[in-house]
Each structure stands twice: as structure tokens, then as C-alpha cells.
Image: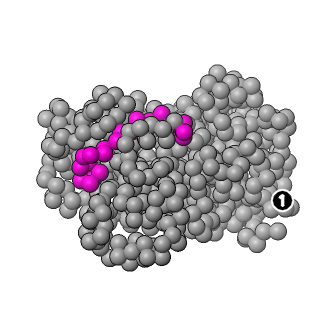
Amino acid sequence: MTDQQIVGHDDWIAARGRFLAREKEFTRLREELSRERHELPWECVKKEYVFEGENGGETLAQLFGGRSQLIAYHFMYEPDWDIGCKSCSSWADNFNGIIPHLNERDMSLVATSRAPLEKLQAQAKRFGWTFKWVSCVGNDFNLDFNVWLAPRTLARGEAVYNHRSERVTGPSRPGISAFFKDDRQVFHTYSTHARGLFDLLPGGVGEWPVTAKTPSCCASR
Amino acid sequence: MTDHKTGTREEWLAARLELLEAEKELTRRSDELARRRQELPWVRIDKAYRFETDEGTEFLADLFRGRSQLLIYHFMFGPDYTAGCPSCSTIADGFEGFAVHLANHDVTLSAVSRAPLAKLQAYKRRMGWTFPWASSLGGDFNFDFNVSLTEEQQRKGAVEYNYRREAAWTVRGIGDSLTKRGEGPVAEIAAMTGTDVAAYTRQRPGMSAFVLENGVVYHVYSTYARGLDGLWGMYQWLDRAPKGRNETGVWWRRHDEYANQGTSAR
């Protein structure tokens, strides 16, 4: 027998109504945060990054695919791994289907990983994914956007992550970075890491009956 | 040339760290809400709801598919719609991909609509979806969970939705759209389902959670309207894009109805 409190419909409605007020407060807070997010200043991206994609070498500006907004999903897949990170893979299962809608809003979404292109293509084929996935193995993209840490930094114990708020021990971390492009240049507008990513899962970790946890691969790679 | 404020990496980082504190606070709030959601009392379901599914006629307990938890997305697809609601379709594009992960964590995610099963099956094939989708046509399920209303309820303005009596909204909101006949965003979406505002809004969006213990089904949770915001994946991504939601009207379509279906992204 369950030890959860069981009530009649009217009592349930009363309890649900009280909780609804809290949920609405949360929705308003989230909107306020979105407004603040869009007030962040932008920084100019001066470095030229070249990625390996199915059309050969592509610059960061080319990854926009003719649109003015780009979100790069930093997919954890190191060159010596046999397959991409398990948690990142479940995130990809989630965003693969919604990309046509984002495209319609003048936004491209691409995944970038340090593994070579052939490995990325093999996994995409196996998982039935159609999003654009490029390799950044030869450039500083993941290093500069704080989702990959150079061995020397790691050895010195100076590696930090999530905007310098966390100390880390592994080389690779999950995150997303957002960019804007006008007719002259590319700007970095936003990045988020760690638990900041969970809000991108529909409902974050909160909406489903599960316990909030850092993905295992993030805790100990 | 952009007129957005630009700065150096150090200036950007200072502003970003300030926002990070606010984001972390929201994350903690979200955790707290999830805890409180699980503390809600449950209601025992005694009514024998019947559904038409790929497996034949089934009861609510069968929709769990051997798991102990069931999440139902109340997909707006009324018997008179010619195609599923385009907004619900963008939500389904998101959960189609992760239903398999929930299924391996003792949670079945299923859609339920009032349209007859054959319509649901055809639309599901068109959209390339694989999640289970049951028809509740002929039963009280959608009405009891406040996601369908009758023509009479609509006429009288006796609408209970999102835990509120919505008489005023029906009269001023939907009523206005009805008299304007074919104007405004609701009319636009209604046309995309082959219906008018009245028929379209007799279905409402929502999600409900159920648990099965010792053969008894309990109702755990339901959410409607903006309560679904967090489940609408594309908006969570757009909120992090430089231009945000950036919308003035209904811009979304079904994923096979866009002019350039993601081709230039590749």
C-alpha cells in the first residue's frame, strides 16, 4: 500500500490550487531572467575558428548557415573516446526534433565536438540524428569557450568551469554558447554550463518525477 | 551594424557572473518546486476510462505498459480536426526524442486525444513519431481532466480550465474571436487544424501524471496553459538565443510545413 496521502477530488483541487500559485511565481521569475539575459553585453569574436564539417572546412561565421543567430552545443566527445557522452546524447535526442522550428526563428543550432568528423558521422547515423555536427579538434573553440581544459592547466590544478565558479579535474565539459552575426562580425552573446543546461530539457529536471542530479559523465570524466 | 551594447570579455564575464547567480537561484527554485510537486496528495481513480490504442480497447492501467508511472500529454486533436494542433505538434517534436529515456526509467509517456484512432495514427505517420497515442473518444477522460469541453459548456461559458472558472475569458476572449470570425492568432491556428475558433478551443492543452500501485491508478498531477512552458523545448532554446522569442504572431508551423526545412542549416 502506498504511504502517499490519498484524498478526494475537492481536497486535491485545493492543494493543487495552492501549488499553482507557486508555479506561476516560478514562471514569472523565469521570464524576468530571460529579459535580464537579453540585456547582457555582447563581446566581439575576433579569432577565426575553422571546423571540419561534411562540406570541408567551415568558419564560425559559416556555421550560421545564412541566419543571424547560432547556438553551439558543446557535445562532449573526445578524440580517443569510442562514443559521445551518454548525457549529451540524451540531450541530442531532445533537440534533434525541434531544430526546424528554431531555424524558422532565424537561428541555427550545431553541435561541436573534439572527436574527428568520421566518429561524429558514425554516431549520428546510428542514432538517426540529422542536426549539423562539426569537429573542432584542430581549433581553440572549446578551449576558449571553457568547455575543454588543456592538459597543462589540469595538471596545475588551475582548471575552472561554469564562468570560473567551479574547479574541475576532467578535460571536457558540457555547455552551450550563443552567437549573433551582423553583416560585419560575429558576437558571443551567452554561454551556460552544468546545471544551467538543464533548463533546456523540456521542464528542466523539475517537471518530471525524477531527482536532480549532475550527469554522471560530468562528475567524473 | 548591431546597436546592442558590446564589451570586452572581462566586461561580458562580469555581467554574465551576475546573471549566473540569478540563474542558479531559479534552478534551486525549480528543485524546490519539484520536491513540492511530489508532496501533492494523490486521488484514487475509480472510473473505468476506456481508450482505443494500437493494441485495441484498453483501460488507463494498460497505458502504463508495465511501468509504474504514466505521463499523459493531452494533445489537442478533436474529432473534427483535420490535423493535430500545430503548437502541440512542436511540443511533441521535443518529447518524441526523449520518451525512450523515460521508458527506461519506469515512466511511460503517452499522448491522448479525442480524435478517432485512425486519424491519430495517420497524423503520427506523417510526422514520423513513435510515442504511444491513444484515442479517448466516447469516454469522459478528456472532460474529467478539463482538456475538452462540450458545445454546451462553451455556449454557457461554464468552462473550468487551469483550475479556474473561465467564464469571463470565454465570453471576452474566445467570444470576441468568434464574432470577429477568422481573425487573430487563435483563428489562425484553428484554420491550420481545419476548424474554426469554437471547434478548435473545445480542446485544451495540458499534461497529467498518474501512478499505478497494487493495481490501483492514482492521479498525481496536472498542468495546463503556461504551466506547459517548461515542456515546450523550442522556447527554452529561443530564450537563450540573442534575439530571444522575438515573435509578433504565430510563426510556427508543423515541421514538414516550413518553406526551407532545415536545408540551409547544413
Between A121 and B266, the residue placed more toward the observer is: B266
Task: Left or right? Give the position of B105 relative to A64.
Answer: left
The residue lying furthest to the top in this view is A82
Q: Is residue B147 above or below residue A36?
A: above
Q: Where on the picture, by quarter, is residue A13?
A: bottom left
Between A148 and A122, the residue placed more toward the observer is: A122
Identify the chain of the residue marked 1, using the numbered disc in the image.
Answer: A
x and y percentages locating residue B222 in the rendered image: 31, 53
Instruction: Name the residue that disc number 1 marks.
Output: A185
Mark 1 packing: few (<14 Cα in 10 Å), some, or many (20+)?
few
- Figure quadrant of the N terminus of chain A: top left
Between B189 and B67, the residue placed more toward the observer is: B189
Range shown magenta: B126-145
Residue at 24%, 35% in the rendered image: B59
x and y percentages locating residue A81 in the rendered image: 65, 24
Q: Check residue B136 for magenta coloring.
A: yes
